[in-house]
């Protein structure tokens, strides 16, 4: 009996309690996975098994990276509705990618996708407002928001290019600028230095995403669509150029 009691105590010490933040995030992820699964199952167009698989893998990888970021340095004891909203935006972006990859939908469904994309964009300001209101502002939340915007922009830029509404240079800038910047930071550590928050950066992100959402509309075509894409790409390029110059000056200083 004494031996059994000793073994039981040792077992209890060896089992680490589950982090409450991990449990909260798991609950949010499970709910949003159900939303994603249901949306794909109810989508009128045919979704190939490979697209189903790719969507679930992307969802799992994105959620796993977010959870790792939370466990690595999230400073609050409550996940908060703010981060749940950001995760929902990422989930809806995955569904949008699935629906667009399934093929060109007829006009009524295409307008429905425009509405969904507009909803994702409108939620972009909600998560930050909730974080400030509830006192849950964090570096993780800010990074989670930025990376969700980057995924959303990548999906929209790929769709606009596939539909012939913008050329590959605009698509590369509007959808890939963030990822090129991150890759460059692996080779040039000075690019990884923290940047001071600027309203200019947020405003250009809104312009970028708004133009890309508008390019989803069936009526967006021709020279007007291409001009809107070029304008947004130039604005994004200028914003990154300003930030890179600031980081270079900080390095030299």
Image: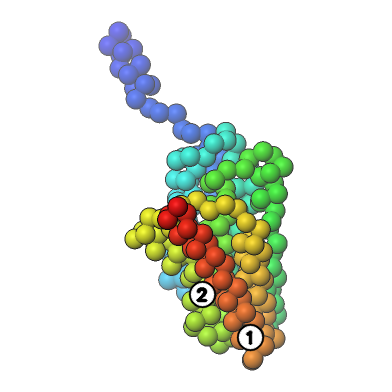
Give residue 227's mark: 1
109 vs 124, nearest the viewer: 124
- Label 1, label 2: how many angstroms apart (C-alpha)? 14 Å
Does 9 sit left or right of 195 as displayed?
A: left
Q: Which residue is mark 2?
A: 173
From what the image shows, is residue 143 above or below residue 54? above
88 vs 180, nearest the viewer: 180
Give residue 101's mark: none
Q: Say which residue appears at 38% left-offset and 27% top-offset.
A: 15
Q: Say which residue appears at 45% left-offset and 40% top-offset.
A: 72
* Rendering coords of residue 20 (x, y %): 53, 34
Q: Say which residue appears at 48% left-offset and 76% top-offset.
A: 172
Residue farthest along the left direction in this orientation: 3
Q: Residues within 10 Å of mark 1 (few under 14, many from 20)?
A: some
- The quadrant in which residue 10 appears is top left
Q: Say which residue appears at 57% left-offset and 52% top-offset.
A: 196
Q: Secondary structure at mark 1?
A: helix
* Rendering coords of residue 179 (x, y %): 45, 65
Q: Earlier in the sequence, mark 1 or mark 2?
A: 2
Residue farthest along the bottom direction in this orientation: 222
């Amino acid at each position: 009996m004494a031996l059994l009691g000793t073994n039981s105590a040792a077992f209890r010490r060896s089992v680490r309690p589950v982090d409450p933040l991990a449990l909260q995030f798991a609950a949010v992820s499970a709910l949003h996975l159900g939303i994603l699964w249901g949306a794909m199952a109810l989508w009128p167009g045919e979704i190939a098994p490979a697209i189903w698989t790719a969507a679930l893998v992307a969802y799992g990888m994105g959620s796993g990276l977010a959870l790792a970021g939370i466990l690595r340095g999230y400073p609050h004891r409550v996940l908060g509705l703010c981060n749940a909203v950001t995760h929902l935006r990422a989930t809806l972006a995955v569904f949008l990618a699935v629906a667009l990859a399934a093929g060109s939908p007829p006009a009524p469904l295409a307008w429905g996708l425009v509405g969904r994309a507009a909803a994702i964009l409108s939620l972009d300001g909600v998560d930050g407002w909730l974080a400030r209101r509830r006192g849950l502002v964090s570096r993780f939340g800010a990074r989670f928001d930025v990376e969700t915007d980057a995924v959303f922009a990548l999906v929209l830029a790929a769709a606009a290019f596939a539909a012939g509404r913008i050329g590959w240079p605009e698509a590369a800038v509007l959808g890939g600028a963030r990822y090129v910047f991150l890759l460059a930071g692996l080779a040039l550590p000075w690019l990884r230095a923290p940047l001071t928050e600027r309203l200019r950066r947020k405003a250009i992100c809104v312009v970028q995403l708004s133009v890309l959402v508008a390019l989803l509309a069936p009526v967006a075509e021709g020279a007007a669509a291409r001009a809107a894409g070029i304008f947004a790409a130039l604005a994004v390029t200028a914003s990154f150029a300003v930030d890179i110059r600031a980081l270079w000056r900080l390095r030299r200083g």
